[in-house]
Image (spheres, rainbow, N blue to C red):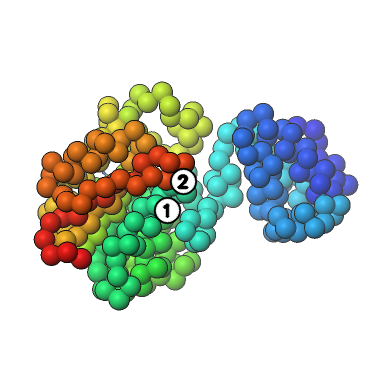
Amino acid sequence: MPAVKSSQTVSDALHTATMLLSRSSPSARLDAELLLEYVTGLSRTNFRANPERELPVNAGWSFQQLVKRRAQGEPVAYIRQQQEFWSLLLEVSPAVLIPRPETELVVERALTHINKEDPVRVADLGTGSGAIALAIASDRPRATVLAIDASKDALELASRNIGRLQLTNVSLLHGSWFAPLEAARCDLIASNPPYIAQDDPDLAPEVKRFEPGMALISGRTGFEALDTIVREAPAHLNDGGWLVLEHGWKQAEGVRQRLVRQGFVHVRSHADLAGHERVTEGQWPGAQR
Ligand SMILES: C[S@@+](CC[C@H](N)C(=O)[O-])C[C@H]1O[C@@H](n2cnc3c(N)ncnc32)[C@H](O)[C@@H]1O
């Protein structure tokens, strides 16, 4: 990358960075703006309003370093150490998966099954940064949300997110899937488990390189975690409770079959904005919620 000169303007810096990033990123201009926002503390709107504003030397140098990291494939969210999800600003680190927009569909579906007034118990299995748990907890303050992960590093980060968002209705539990729940039953269980097959050729190299393997890969077929969750969920759901699962875009049929075989009713998949079925839910029979 050409050196960032001390006299560089916002417009020049963004132009140079965009040129460099366009070789490796499909969102080069946006990436450059987000990184400059992070370095300067100014908003993207401000950049557009003041393109000729001169960057302080230090900011120009820091920006150049961050653009280099991005050009090497590191995700913008890890560089900025934050990601927006469901209107919440979450801290992220390489210990957790970067929350994806399609996971908001899990939250959307979960919220349709939880009345605002009901003091229900909800579990989020494989909480990572806490994305699903915190989104549900903030929209349903009367719910108690149990956020579970097998990674202590992920739980430490989720704990900071809970603190920053000042949510008092989320508890973090360490362990594998349902184990920390012991005999407790929930009204809703949500999960975005790892669901990629270990040899999946479609797994983007930069995702594999930067995001934690245990958040992505689930055995030979990709169904290992989903199988465990579907099999064990009935012992942890109240009658009429819901299981809401995210999965890969080719796995919807397989997840539906597993839920039906297990005895769930009202089994249905939902498509994301790209039209791919990415979330499947089922109700444990009994009193209708
Ligand atoms: C796909 S990530 C989802 C993270 C977050 N819920 C989200 O949607 O952004 C899967 C999460 O499951 C966790 N995980 C993997 N194996 C687990 C297990 N056996 N028990 C509990 N959590 C597990 C990983 O640490 C990771 O945080």
Look at mark 2 in the image and give the residue it sits on: 273
- Most extreme residue toward the right is 7
Marks 2 and 1, how far apart at CA: 11 Å
Q: In the rendered view of the protein, which quadrant contains the N terminus?
A: top right
Q: Is residue 253 left or right of residue 285?
A: right
Residue 122 at x, y percent in the picture:
27, 62
Say if 167 sits above or below 36 in the image: below
Residue 131 at x, y percent in the picture:
41, 55
Residue 248 seen in the figure: yes
Residue 250 at x, y percent in the picture:
34, 33
Q: Nearer the viewer, residue 94 or 239?
A: 239
Q: In the rendered view of the protein, which quadrant contains the C terminus?
A: bottom left
Say if 31 sits above or below 113 in the image: above
What's the residue at 80%, 49% (across, down)?
10
Q: Nearer the viewer, residue 19 or 117?
A: 117
**Which amino acid is tagged 1?**
Glu
What's the residue at 30%, 45% (across, down)?
269
Q: Is mark 2 within 8 Å of ligand 1?
A: no
Say if 148 sits above or below 247 in the image: below
What's the residue at 54%, 45% (across, down)?
78
Look at mark 1 in the image and give the residue it sits on: 104
Residue 115 at x, y percent in the picture:
30, 70
Q: Residues within 10 Å of mark 1 (few under 14, many from 20)?
A: some
Q: Are marks 2 and 1 in contact (CB under 8 Å)?
A: no
Q: Does dot 1 land on a helix, a strand or a loop?
A: helix
Q: Is residue 196 left or right of residue 95?
A: left
